[in-house]
Image (cartoon, grey):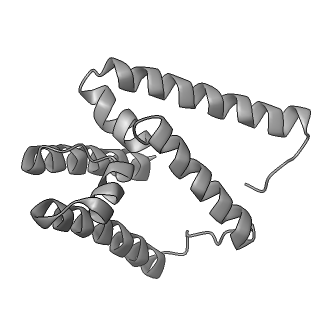
Amino acid sequence: MLAAILGGALIGLSASLFWSLNRRVAGISGILSGALFDRGQERWVSVAFLLGLLLAGIAFALTTDRVPAPWLPLLPLSVAGLLVGFGTRLGGGCTSGHGVCGLSRFSVRSLAAVLTFMASAALTVFVVRHILKIWLPS
């Protein structure tokens, strides 16, 4: 429980710092887009943010034994990643952008997005577990 509280506090702190220092929302889809398509200083801020995410993940993997390996083959994971990318583009942002940054700024658009993807997630879990009877390892 303490790890979850600390993790949430760090996410909130990093989102607040990113907004304060760059006047940009710390949504990963927007940051990835900035790293690919922006020019100059904006691009390097995005690249640095993404490198920080990558290095933090590597550091966590090297210092703990709590990083599970994916149990699905690479192809379905890649297709799922592309579908998530399409959905974030269609929805005007990702869960981190809408859920962490948008809701904290009282964005009505972000509230609608969060309610939509949370309802979709709940429906997906219900269908997969109770209708299709697929039990995924936990």
Total number of numbered labels? Answer: 0
Q: Nearer the viewer, residue 70 or 64?
A: 70
The quadrant where residue 16 appears: top left
The quadrant where residue 105 appears: top left
Q: Nearer the viewer, residue 60 or 44?
A: 44
Identify whether 126 is placed above or below 15: above
Identify whether 48 is placed above or below 81: below
Left or right of 26? Residue 134 is right
Instruction: Locate the C terminus and report the quarter of the image it occupies.
Output: bottom right
Identify whether 75 is placed above or below 121: below
Left or right of 109? Residue 125 is right
Query: Which residue is located at x 31 percent, y 49 percent?
Result: 11
Query: Which residue is located at x 44 percent, y 40 percent?
Result: 95
State the image coordinates of residue 6 (x, y, percent, origin top left): 33, 50
Q: Nearer the viewer, residue 66 or 2?
A: 66
In this view, the residue farthest toward the bottom is 62
Query: Which residue is located at x 56 percent, y 49 percent?
Result: 84
State the image coordinates of residue 47 (x, y, percent, origin top left): 26, 68
Identify whether 79 is placed above or below 114: below
State the image coordinates of residue 66 (x, y, percent, origin top left): 55, 69
In this view, the residue farthest toward the top is 108
Left or right of 115? Residue 80 is right
Query: Which residue is located at x 46 percent, y 27 percent?
Result: 113
Q: Nearer the viewer, residue 86 or 116?
A: 86
State the image coordinates of residue 68 (x, y, percent, origin top left): 62, 69
